[in-house]
């Protein structure tokens, strides 16, 4: 996803989401030891009379290592906000449970049955997660906005991406509302008394961070079908034509990623104008874009590419621990660039990476930390220039190191291995090593788990048909090892040479018949570094 601040600053690019192995990660979420949620059914009743919601959640759990107590997240009522639980049932029998510390702790009844269904009855006013507000045009609206762990404000669930499940929403609301939600629409029924029931069902397992509903007055349009996947736009009626136009590019983006990465996991791809705290939120199959993304000027292609890329990376292949969120945000950042490169050419890739390079350098001055940072314990703090732009730059450098063919083969292999599942950085490294036949330990250690980047001071001189280039790494904490391309320009023509840097100081000599007009480092934007020649 992207924040408004990040979105605006980089003109629809990404500005904004541990030492290996993950044993040292600081993802402190207490996981259930045995219970694995298989499916959620959330029946919700929404009203115009108040912001209180009434819910009945049906949760199917498979017990893997014995039938043990387990917990669901749900923010309890406190003053004006939170949920009050009126009952928990195992099948039709009242369950043995407690509700404290914003956790519903359930002790399963005596039985040998390994798969069981629980029902939670609750109601209250959500403070976050479900945004109940008015649109910029003054229409009342309800939008799910769960990332990273806000589903617990309105949905009893395992609110962490490690436990993914299929989901169904059954929304009962005043009949004048249009409803879109995660999954395929399976029912829309008028119930009388001014109420309408709308149900959506997503069979693919999804994390709670990316399930959503959108309930307001919508204009909706089927934009196209891509390999039998319906692509639609859900926008406010007041800017209907502009929204249909702006979101139309999603069909091209979807086709690019299917063709280059692998199968799309979800029932549909809806693009929804919404009230969201983010510039875009990659909800599985039902992406939310901030309200002012609709202008009719077709300027949100980069934003759409980023959020659609998340359908593969972050949604389907999800980080197992929050500290590895670059597997979501860094991937979406770079794959949005790859899409734009495919449309506009290599200069577009370089342009976007140079914008990101500046952000990375500026950010490091204030936040000298690695991409995978074990000191972060709050999921809301894992998003940064490191996990977005620097993560994207890591993929750019890996692509150049391995070559396009091997890089794409590795990406497809990684996605196939972890589609609808979870991974950490070591999993990605292992697959890229297997596909390439290369030892990538140094590469991943220095770019993911070591703070900073090469800070290079350099100069060149020409004498006796030799071009002498002197390069020094100025950063003190680590000597980076990397290939450095040197562009030598003569009479408007550039010739590129490569030298391997593995020491603090490196001298590189090139034999030349005449003095060059200019020498530049990294002419094709393949290396993340900071030039320190001032």
Image (spheres, rainbow, N blue to C red):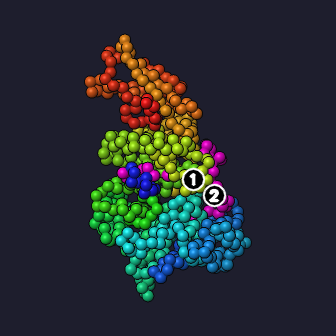
Q: Tell me where residue 244 appears, x and y as whole percent.
A: 30, 64
Determine whether the residue tagged by mark 2 lies in a helix, strand or loop: loop
State which quadrant residue 218 falls in.
Answer: bottom left
Farthest top residue in view:
464
What percent of the width, then of the height, locates residue 501? 49, 27
Residue 347 seen by the camera: yes
Does residue 395 appear anywhere in the picture?
no
Q: Tell me the residue that label 2 is attached to.
A: 29
| Mark 1 vs 2: CB contact within 8 A | yes
Q: In this view, does 496 lie to the left or right of 414?
A: left
The first of marks 1 and 2 along the sequence is: 2
Tell me the residue at 43%/87% (across/down): 192
Q: Mark 1 points at which residue?
A: 322
Question: Magenta span covers which residues?
Answer: 11-38
Q: Is residue 459 above or below residue 54?
A: above
Q: Per the image, is 31 magenta?
A: yes
Nearer to us in this view, 94 or 406: 94
Work out which residue is located at the far right of the displayed protein and give it: 110
Screen quadrant of the C terminus: top left
């Amino acid at each position: 996803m992207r924040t408004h601040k990040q979105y605006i600053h980089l003109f629809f690019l990404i500005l904004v989401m541990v030492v290996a192995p993950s044993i040292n990660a600081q993802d402190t979420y207490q996981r259930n030891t045995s219970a694995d949620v298989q499916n959620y059914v959330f029946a919700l009743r929404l009203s115009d009379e108040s912001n209180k919601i009434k819910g009945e959640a049906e949760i199917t759990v498979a017990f893997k290592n014995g039938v043990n107590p387990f917990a669901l997240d749900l923010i309890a009522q406190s003053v004006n906000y939170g949920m009050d639980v009126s009952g928990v049932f195992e099948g039709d029998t009242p369950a043995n449970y407690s509700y404290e510390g914003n956790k519903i702790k359930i002790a399963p009844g005596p039985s040998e049955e390994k798969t069981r269904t629980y029902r939670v009855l609750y109601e209250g006013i959500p403070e976050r997660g479900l945004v109940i507000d008015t649109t910029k045009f003054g229409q009342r609206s309800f939008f799910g906005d769960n990332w990273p762990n806000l589903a617990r404000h309105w949905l009893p669930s395992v609110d962490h991406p490690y436990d993914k499940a299929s989901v169904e929403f059954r929304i009962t609301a005043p009949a004048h509302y249009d409803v879109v939600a995660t999954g395929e629409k399976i029912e829309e029924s008028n119930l009388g008394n001014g109420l309408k029931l709308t149900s959506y069902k997503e069979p693919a397992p999804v994390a709670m961070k990316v399930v959503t509903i959108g309930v307001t007055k919508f204009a909706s349009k089927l934009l196209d079908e891509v390999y039998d996947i319906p692509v639609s736009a859900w926008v406010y009626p007041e800017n209907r034509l502009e929204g249909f136009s702006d979101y139309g590019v999603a069909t091209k983006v979807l086709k690019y990623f299917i063709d280059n990465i692998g199968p799309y996991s979800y029932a549909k791809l809806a693009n929804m104008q919404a009230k969201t705290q983010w510039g875009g939120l990659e909800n599985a199959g039902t992406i939310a874009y901030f309200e002012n993304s609709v202008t009719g000027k077709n300027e949100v292609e980069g934003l759409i590419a980023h959020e659609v890329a998340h359908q593969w990376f972050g949604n389907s292949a999800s980080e197992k621990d929050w500290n590895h969120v670059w597997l979501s945000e860094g991937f979406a950042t770079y794959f949005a660039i790859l899409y734009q490169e495919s449309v506009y050419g290599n200069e577009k890739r370089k342009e976007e990476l140079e914008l990101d390079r500046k952000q990375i350098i500026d950010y490091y001055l204030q936040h000298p930390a690695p991409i995978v940072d074990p000191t972060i314990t709050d999921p809301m703090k894992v998003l940064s220039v490191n996990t977005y732009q620097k993560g994207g730059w890591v993929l750019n450098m890996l692509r150049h190191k391995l070559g396009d063919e091997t890089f794409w083969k590795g990406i497809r292999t990684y996605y196939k291995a972890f589609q609808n599942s979870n991974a950490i950085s070591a999993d990605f490294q292992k697959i890229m090593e297997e596909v390439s036949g290369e030892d990538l330990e140094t590469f991943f250690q220095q770019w993911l788990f070591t703070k900073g980047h090469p800070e290079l001071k350099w100069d060149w001189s020409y004498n006796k048909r030799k071009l002498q280039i002197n390069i020094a790494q100025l950063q003190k904490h680590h000597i980076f090892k990397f290939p450095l391309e040197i562009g030598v320009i003569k009479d408007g023509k550039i010739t590129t040479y490569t030298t391997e840097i593995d020491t603090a100081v490196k001298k590189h000599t090139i034999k030349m018949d005449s003095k060059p007009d200019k020498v530049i480092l990294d002419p094709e934007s393949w290396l993340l570094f900071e030039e320190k020649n001032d």
